[in-house]
Amino acid sequence: MSAPVVEKFLTRNFAVRDSHALKVYRDTGGYSALAKAQTMEPAAIVDEVKKSNLRGLGGAGFPTGMKWSFIPKDHAGPVYLVINADEGEPGTFKDRYLLERDPHALIEGMIIAARAIKSALGFVYIRGEYVEPWRRFSAAVREAYEAGYLGQGFDIVVHRGAGAYICGEETGLISSLEGKKGWPKVKPPFPAIKGAFGQPTIVNNVETICCVPHIVNRGAAWFAGLGSKTQGGTRMYSVSGRVNKPGVYEESCAITLRQLIEVAGGVSGSGVLKGVVPGGSSAPILAAHEIDVTMDVDGLRNAGTMAGSAGVIVFDETVSIPDALMVVARFYAHESCGQCTPCRESTGWIYKMTHRLVEGKGRKDDLDTILDVAKRGAGTTICAFYDGAVGPYISYIEKFRSEFEARCRS
Amino acid sequence: MPKLTIDGKEIEVPAGTNLIEAARRLGIEVPHYCYHPGLSIAGQCRLCMVDIEKTPRPTIACNTQAAEGMVVHTQTDRVKETRRSIMEFHLINHPLDCPVCDQAGECWLQIYYMKHGLYDPRMKDEKVHKPKAVPLGPHVMLDAERCILCSRCVRFCDEITHTGELGIFNRGDHSEIGLFPGTDLENKYSGNVVDICPVGALTDRDFRFQVRVWYLDTTKSICTGCARGCNIDVHVNRRRPHHAEGRRVARLKPRYNEHVNRWWMCDAGRYGYGFVDAPTRLALPLVREAGGTREASWSDAMAAVAEAFGRLPGEQAAIIASPKLANEDLFAIKTLAETKGIRQVGFRVPPREPGDEDHFLIRADKNPNTRGAELIGLDGKVDAILNEATARRVRSLVVFEHDLFEGQWREGDVRSALDAVDSLIYVGTNANATSARAHIVLPAAAWVERDGTFTNFEGRVQRFRPALGHLGEAMPAWEIVGRIIAATGGTTAAARAEHWFRALAGSVPAFAGLTYQSLGDEGAMTGPA
């Protein structure tokens, strides 16, 4: 079965020359949703987004409209809108394209979202390594000020990160934005109640907010109809690894993983699939026989993995899973912020064990130790980082145990 | 006031109480490292997990407030298993160097491993190595390998002293406590980070390698460093007298008192006990004669006091008491003055430099009992007494504790006053320039060698208790004063400090109704003067 045909509205201008420029954006219908939103009551915007089934596209998949509705109604001080552009999940590179090629979509979405949550100030936290996206987006912000879209009751502050993965976790991001070490915050309180600088704060992903103008313009029903029953719209899939045409693909949330690999030109290398990581490095791996699943949040959750950031990493049969796990384990050991004991200590420990395994100095009971340590630490920490690390630790070993055992000494 | 159930026991607690404190009220200990009641919630050690009914997985107790109807279990299999796991994570990179670690014996890694760990170690790989024996400041030494990164010390410097010297640097299992560039841990309260460090990462530089903690005995006391009267524990080493170069007091630790110092004390107070075991301590009475000074028995010394002081009319004698003395001592001095008809009594010797003061604990008045001396009514003018001495109208002078040369008066004036009297009697714990000029020197027991009470600047009367025996033949000042009263023809039935306190309470209205029992461990406020 071939992939469902959907209108590609998020990426529609990617191939247009100077798509990042205000003129091109306006010529292709940009900022028309803003005009419409300005005639809508804030509550009506929240309602429309709720009905659209838009879910957070950064990784957690939380319903966006519901998140917005958590802002206390009677709050006297400022409310902040924070855009998470700290795209750091390995295998994910979609927000980068949006910032570089359609920055005004984010700005327009932010102004609308700010109206919905009654915020006068937005922050865009851009990953430090994203130099060109930062340049493009900053230029677009200047254009938007000159054109009067910004500075009329809503301002945007662009902030660059310094390269820590954990600053993509929403409360780690807030700590970093506040000028502190990027440590996730203990919850409760949740950011919608007490976030950046102690004020109610909504943190949304770039792609999520880029959907908002389209929902306002074309209605919740249209958007909901593009996806699955519980998740509206399309998604930008970052497909990498052993495929013939790696890149960013905007497809329905209801596409299957098998179809998506076909869209990306099929498996390269040996041409025989070994496994796929469907949602960024934190998502448990799916074996070759498990890829007939839809790519929406619930579809992948039912398959025992997660949609995450929609970073799809394809392994053909020549890829060594133990080597892959060691690379992943090194990443999590390096990026653990070190705040919570279970994560701080066991990410390093598990990396040492996987490293020993791939060097041929491991023993079979090390595999059981890794699994046990991973399971014991899961769910015990402040943020989801460790649970994300546990995804690959457990799934790689459980699904490909014989490969690991073949590398063991005894 | 939410009512909740913990391990089957119901309890009502004030709104906002977290589950660690709620459980504590029931005598249930929820193990924890990063939580400290005086600091903000960090929630990072992950040890204080408890099960709350209708919650899918164990929850940290420190960041969970008691709620009406909440049902909490601290001993489920799942909680116990989680604790065991967390203990293993805390210890995999720990050097396990307990035999050479000063914290051994009072280390929460040891205590909790025995209570909640007891797993078989599985760590076979090389541990993470970090800096060791790093001086952070004048008082504190860091061993980063022993550190469990609970961040209590960091939060202390951020939230209590607001000096922010410490941070956690690097990430993951390479995280380590350290100083921000260009800073030293030299705030006035730095020693507290050693107290709140649950492990051997931060140790006291003056206590390191001196004596094992299991040889120490603990006595409740009051800091004498200033007028705040911080509550302390005195740790003394009686069982290994050959350790720590013979020093008997090993260290002072703050003791919680909600009304005075909560969990904290300043470094000046904490490290200010050196005089107790100093070479200048007076252990025997001394009498100066034509040929020089000789050691004397108490009876000889008292005979000399009677000779010099006893037959003199009251108007020719004067007493300079000290705000370092206990209420009991001061009341004994008042009794002596009344018995002898001595009207020239003072206690205030203004320091040459005003003492430092802050908005937290430290008071400019570096005496523990100025308020007590004021209330007991000994506040005559000391400079007037010295003038009278110089004019030879005062023939005999008793000085307690003070070195009058350390005050703000000109040295020559003090010298002519002291040289002018026929007899100078010095009562004190340590020798000084004043005692060197005394005709009779009577050795007083230091506060850690006796019991008594101080009245802090707010009027709180607080007990201190004997941690040690008297050094040599030293005696508490109240007992010396009692002997002087007896030697000069008066009588006193007070054989214990408490007797003097009873007499004080019966005589000075501000102390009316107070007893050693009613003072308890937290002290009690004096009434209107």
Image (cartoon, grey):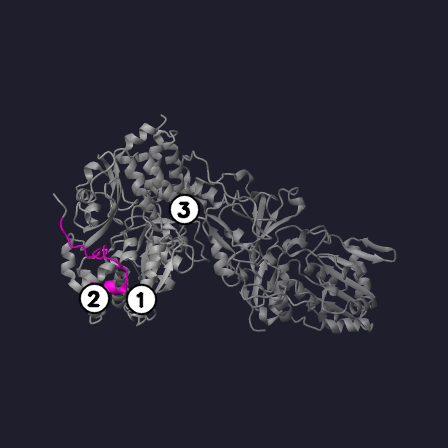
Question: Residue B298, position in %: x, y?
Answer: 76, 55
**Residues in magenta?**
A4-29
Residue A143: give its label.
1
Q: In the orientation shown, which residue stands out farthest toward the left?
A: A1
Tell me the residue that label 3 is attached to: A341
Residue A38 or residue B357, whichever sits in front? A38
Tell me the residue that label 2 is attached to: A33
Horizontally, is A3 left or right of B178 in the view?
left
Q: Which comes before the other along the chain, label 1 or label 3?
A: 1
Q: Is residue A207 visible?
A: yes
Q: Nearer the viewer, mark 1 or mark 2?
A: 1
For the residues bearing labels 1 and 3, Cβ distance under 8 angstroms:
no
Provide the secondary structure element on which disc 2 rests.
Answer: helix
Question: Residue A347, position in %: x, y?
Answer: 38, 42
Question: Residue A124, position in %: x, y?
Answer: 33, 60
| CA distance separating discs 2 and 3 | 47 Å
Horizontally, is B369 left or right of A152 in the view?
right
Q: Which comes before the other along the chain, label 1 or label 2?
A: 2
